[in-house]
Structure formats: C-alpha cells, structure tokens
Image (spheres, grey):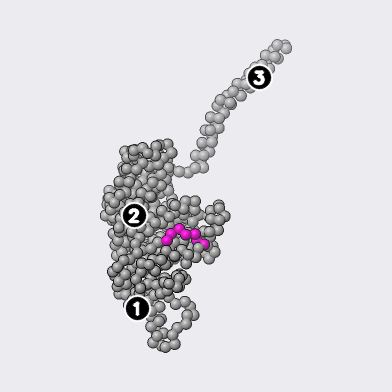
Amino acid sequence: MDDAIAFLYDSEEDEERDELAVMVVYGPLHFDARRRERRSETRLYLTRPDLPPNPRVGTPWQYMYEGRQDRAFITTMGFDCDAFQLILDSGFAILWATSPIPRNDTSAVGAPRLNARSLDAAGALGLILHYLASSMPATGLQQIFGIIPSTVTRYLDFAMPALLTTLEGIPDAAIRWPRNDEFAIYNGMIIYRHPRLTGAFGTCDGLKLLVQVSDDPDIENATYNGWTHGHYETSVFAFTPLGIIMSATVNAPGSWHDARIARPLFTQLLEKTPAGWYIVADTAFPRGPHNIQGRIRAPLKQNSVLPADPDERRERLAFNTQLVQFRQSAEWGMRALQGSFGRLRVPLDINDEQGRVRLILTCVRLNNLRANRVGISEIRRVYEPLWRSEDDELWENFKDMLFADVRRRDRVSRFYRRD
C-alpha cells in the first residue's frame, strides 16, 4: 500500500515536471505568438498582399504617368508634363540613379541597386510631388504607388533633399531679388491696373504654418502665438506681380514679431533696391527702420489724419484704394502657395527643424518654377477656378476647420477616388 502511494506521488511529480518543462520550452513561443497577434489587431497598415504585386506595373500612378495628360499632372502634382520632365532631366534622375538610399541594414557607400528599387526616377519624383501637393495620409500614397509604408517613408526622406538640390540648379526655380530693368518691368505690370502706384514692384506678407506642440517647454513657448492661440512657425515672403517669390525668410518661431523676421527683406530693400522703388504690405506689417523709409508702403490705418485740402484728400484716398487692391495679390500668393502644396496645411514636425526648412524652401522653389514654366495664365485658369469653385468652404473657413476635414477635402486624394 505504501509503495502504491509513493508511486502515485512520483507520477504526479513527474507530470508536474513535464508540464513545467513544456512551459519553459514553448511558453515564450506562445507568448510571442500571442503578442504578435495582439499587435496586428491594433496596428493598421497596408502590407504587400494588400497592394499591386509590382509597383512598376498597373498602379494608379503608372496609368496616369503613361497617359501623359497635362490636366492630370497639374491636378495631382502642380506641373504639366513638360515641367515634370524638366525636373527629371535637370538632375533628379541622376541623383536617383547614382546615390544609394540610406538603410540600416545596408552599406551607406555601396553602389545603388536600381533594379531592386520599387520605383524608377519618374516614380520617385511623382511620389514626392504627390506628397507635397496633398495633405492625404501615407496610406493614400501607398495605394497610388503600390509600395509598403516603410518604403514610402524611406523614399520620401531620400527624395526631398534630392528634389531641393535639383531645384537649386534650375534658374526658373530661383528665389531671386529683381535686378536692373526688372523693377521697371514689374512696375509696368502694376500700373497697368493701378496707375497711381508708380514705383511699386511687388508685395510682401507673413505666413504662419502650424507646427506640432513640443514637449520641450522652451520650444513650446517659442512657437506659441498669443494672438491666434496656436503653435506656428512664421515665414515672410515677397511676391512679384507674376506670382514669383523673390524673397523668403522661413521657419522663424511663431512668437517672433514680423519686424524681427523681416530683417533680411529690409536689407534687400536697402542694399539691392534703387531709390524710388517700393513694395506694398498690409497695415500691420512693419515698415522697417528709418533708413528704408518709404520702401514699404501700406494702406491707411483707421482714423488716419487726411489732408484738409479736398483735392489732396481725394488723391490720397484714391492712392490708398489702389494700395489696398494691389496688396490683395499677396493674399492670393499665400493662398496659391498653400493651395498648391497641401503638405503645408499639415502640422509640421516640431522635432525636425532641418526638415521643416527643406520642406518650405522646396515648396517655394516649386512655386517659382510653376509660375515660370506652367505660366501665370495657366495657374489662374486651372488652379484658381479649381480651388475656388470646389473648395470655397476650405478657403473661407480654413482656420475653423478640423484637420480631418482638411484631409477629407484634399484635391489630390479626390482625383484618385472612385466612389
């Protein structure tokens, strides 16, 4: 009897040891499997089986690129086919073919493996221009180009500096102050519509772009704007009558006053502008130091003192009316910049200062290239009617719209939508 009880106890102990051994050996595997299962339930992203099998064949991008329709190119990327090809031929294709794309699992100095890349140079340029022209989430780009999330991120990080480097070598994309006879040419365009504005050659204004809220109290305080109760970076742009940006100071903290940000503009007005020429700003824009007095003119403020003489009074009011009318071109320029490049409507990464500067300067140079190559008449005919007629709510109520609504109204994502 005692032997039987002892045998029973030994059997139970052996069974417990076996179960413990199984748990030790297979427990971690089961735990890892369960963890992966839970992770897949909470992480929503596209994988290769969800996308076209070959990113270079049969994707929405490939259909559009092979169709070569100017309107499709302009609607989704802001450029017609000729301007797109110009960017490719001006250096972007070479940079794409000769530079390895940085990866953690490959050598940074190895030769590029072009056949192993999901996109060719045209596809990479199309990807970055789609990204800049829209506010759509990354999933939209993944579906349009047939590439997985990690590839989208890696290609965008590589293509952005390559695009900016290419644009810096294209004269029509330059950010350049007028020279010689250009002051008179621009003034001629202005006085054709506003005869009293002799000497005016452009307009200027500040633009605030939303940024993410920083965890660093110093950065958070620097980007906070007390007037608008939001976090911004501020840029100052000056426009020619053709819509070309001739001066750009970008990525200043949102709490800075325009007078501090506009110092490079004041220097250009003092050192690079002949006497008698001026630009037009709004009433709130700083007029600069005493040594550039008269080179920035603005409409009258409320309750301004007017001349007592009736004729002088009428002339002063007529001049002021034309200042107000021409100054609206700066507003159009700012709206065209944000309308063309929807990425500027997405809160910018507060932790990537270099990336913010690169993004804004790329959009500025693309704006100039589009103004020169696509043509201002083409912009007004295609862009402005498109945005104003279809997106009046976006323009009139932009400050009050939720970020989700901005993305919902994105014109590029609508172009590819098939309801």
Place of residue 288 in the rendered image (x, y in percent of width and height, measured from the top left): 45, 70
Q: What is the distance, in whole Å, between disc 1 and disc 3 at their CAs?
A: 104 Å
Please give the residue where the numbered disc 1 appears in the rendered image: 196
Question: What amino acid type is highlighted by mark number 1?
Answer: Arg
Q: Residue at x 48, y 63 (%)?
A: 399
Number of the front mark, 2 or 1: 2
Quadrant containing the N terminus is top right
Q: Of callouts 1 and 3, which one flags the residue occurring earlier in the amino acid sequence?
A: 3
Q: Is residue 260 above or below residue 149?
A: below
Number of the front mark, 1 or 3: 1
Q: Which mark is residue 337?
A: none
Please give the residue where the numbered disc 2 appears in the rendered image: 168
Q: Residue at x 69, y 12 (%)?
A: 4
Answer yes or no: is residue 158 visible: yes
Question: Outermost residue, bottom direction?
Answer: 309
Q: Residue at x 43, y 72 (%)?
A: 291
Q: Of callouts 2 and 1, which one flags the residue occurring earlier in the amino acid sequence?
A: 2
Question: What amino acid type is highlighted by mark number 2?
Answer: Glu
Question: What amino acid type is highlighted by mark number 3?
Answer: Glu
Q: Is residue 351 left or right of residue 363?
A: right
Please give the residue where the numbered disc 3 appears in the rendered image: 13
Q: Is residue 220 above or below residue 5?
A: below
Label 3, residues with CA under 10 Å away: few <14, some 14-19, many ≥20: few
The magenta span reads 249-255
Q: Is residue 252 left or right of residue 386?
A: right
Place of residue 133 in the rendered image (x, y in percent of width and height, measured from the top left): 38, 55
Classify mark 3: helix, strand or loop: helix
* Residue 339 is a magenta residue: no
Mostly what secondary structure, the magenta segment?
Answer: strand
Q: What is the distance, in whole Å, between disc 3 and disc 2 at their CAs?
A: 77 Å
Label 1, residues with CA under 10 Å away: few <14, some 14-19, many ≥20: some
Classify mark 1: helix, strand or loop: loop
